[in-house]
Amino acid sequence: MAAHMSTSEVACTLRLVDRTASDLLADHRIARFSHPALAEAFAARWAAPGACKALTREEREALVELVARSDEVANLEVALAAAGLEPDRGLLEYAATGGALRVCAWLVEDDRIEEEIPWGRILLEAADKRQRAAAEWCLAQCPQVSETWLRAAAATAAGNNDLPLMDWLLAKADERAALAGSAAEAGFVDDEEGEDQERRSMPSDLATGQRLCLSAIDACDLANVQRLWQQQLKAGSEGPELLQQAAHRALASPTPDWQAKVEWLLSRGADLPPGSYHSCLELKDGAAVVERFKWLRSRGIRPDPDLALRGSLSFVLFAEIAGTGNVEMMRWLHVECDWDQFGATYTSDAWAAAVGSGCDAALELLSDFGSPEPEDGQPYVRAIERREWSILCRLRQRFSIPFGPPELELFTAAIRAGAPVTALQLLADGQCPGLDWAAAEVEALYPRRNRHRLVVLAWIREQRRRLRIQERVLKLWGAAGRPGQGRRR
């Protein structure tokens, strides 16, 4: 039964049937606002007076938006009343992009939304979320949505490789264009004043054939790219700038035929300058980036050392590669580039990025390459943010990276993030700047989910006790050594 119910329904109803159900479904205790929930259970929690008194305006808006996504009208009414909010077009857009069509229908009934509804914008967002049913509903509500918005939505669908939705939207755009042409021939002017504000907010190139073709380059295969290229581009619109943009986007395309797309564009006059290496970094897969790097190198294209001297390649290319932890890519770049010029520019960005990757080998490689040790403390900041305690220790013990300025407050930040005693001991032994034991104890006292908290608190108190003893000894020693004090020997 639980497999056929939403998580909220399981948490609020099925789990409460009896003790056996409660034991079996012990892990299903969280009710998600965006999932359907029984109206009675929802009202029991949110219909009570003052149910939202502890929530900020932003949190109340988030509550209403999530409930709208659940497509439960009764629960949305309760949420709106509890939050003290009125339906608006932003809520309609949120519901549409989540495919909550019952809520959408309720929102547009009886003029519940007093503002003018931006149907074109909602259509665009629905296409972006691959919500075909919501897009169809938008057009049913407002058949006069302009050709401009229809083609913009088609370009968005192409960028998601949602070809059925793209083709449907293009067909609707052609129908709209034909109707507008027939009306113009008959002497009628299409009244689209209601969309003037939307048009002003739309990027000027959003609905052009060029935009659609570039979106297709990102996600579609070569056959569909060629089809759209032929259908959407007017004669003479295939200029050098478009070809250059398309080639860069093809390099970053995750489709298996990316190389065929690039070569097809090259045959039409595109060019691949040294800056093409940057385009590949948009990919999340490190192996795919290396594949494209090697392909560019096989065509005689090298990363431009001059870019490194200007900081562009070092801060963007190498730091991003270090952030992936892909040692093969780092080695490849080391071999292919003039390291005497190139390596000197690698500063904290690369070290911090490598720490963020969580890869020890990437840090070793930076050290082997002679990358300068950063002095701003950012590698430690990143290690604390990512809770990489072993890497934090290695930064000091293996690479002797400076801690950075006192204002970073690394010690208290590490306690706040849940650092174990071993990491804190290293920071303390290294005289971490800004070390304040009193502030550290206050931070450790703060209740939070941290399995090391009690051990850390006891350790901090022991350190403070030892420091107090040392201070007393020093005071006594100083008093004994002053003239006129103590016995002469």
Image (cartoon, rainbow, N blue to C red):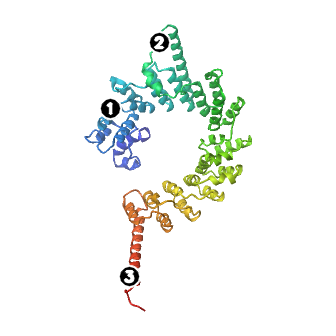
Amino acid type assigned to the residue bearing label 1 in the image: Glu
Q: Closest to the observer: 92 or 118?
A: 118
Residue 246 against residue 371 in the figure, above or below: above
What percent of the width, then of the height, locates residue 454? 40, 64
In this rendered view, identify the residue nearer to me: 192 or 359.
192
Residue located at (30% from left, 40% from top): 46
Q: Label 2 sits on what residue type?
A: Val
Measured Cα–Cα span from mark 2 to mark 1: 36 Å
Amino acid bearing label 3: Ala
Q: Nearer the viewer, mark 3 or mark 2?
A: 3
The residue that mark 1 highlights is 86
Marks 2 and 3: in contact by CB < 8 Å? no
Q: Nearer the viewer, residue 93 or 477?
A: 477
The image quadrant where one finds the N terminus is top left
Closer to the chain start, of discs 3 and 2, is 2
Q: Is residue 232 visible?
A: yes
Of callouts 2 and 1, which one flags the residue occurring earlier in the amino acid sequence? 1
Q: Residue furthest top?
A: 186
Determine which quarter of the picture holds residue 161: top right
Q: Position of residue 412 (x, y in %)?
A: 43, 60
Q: CA distance from mark 3 to mark 2?
A: 99 Å
> Separation of disc 1 and disc 3 at Cα?
74 Å
Residue 55: image x %, image y %? 32, 43
Q: What secondary structure is found at the residue carrying circle 1?
A: loop
- Tell me the crowding category of disc 1: few under 14, some 14 to 19, or many 20 or more residues within 10 angstroms, Cα based: few
Q: Which residue is mark 3?
A: 479
Horizontal side of residue 9 vs 298, given as left or right: left
Of mark 1 and mark 3, the one earlier in the sequence is: 1
**On screen, residue 392 above or below 237:** below
- Residue 189: numbered disc: 2
Residue 163, percent from left and from top = 57, 28
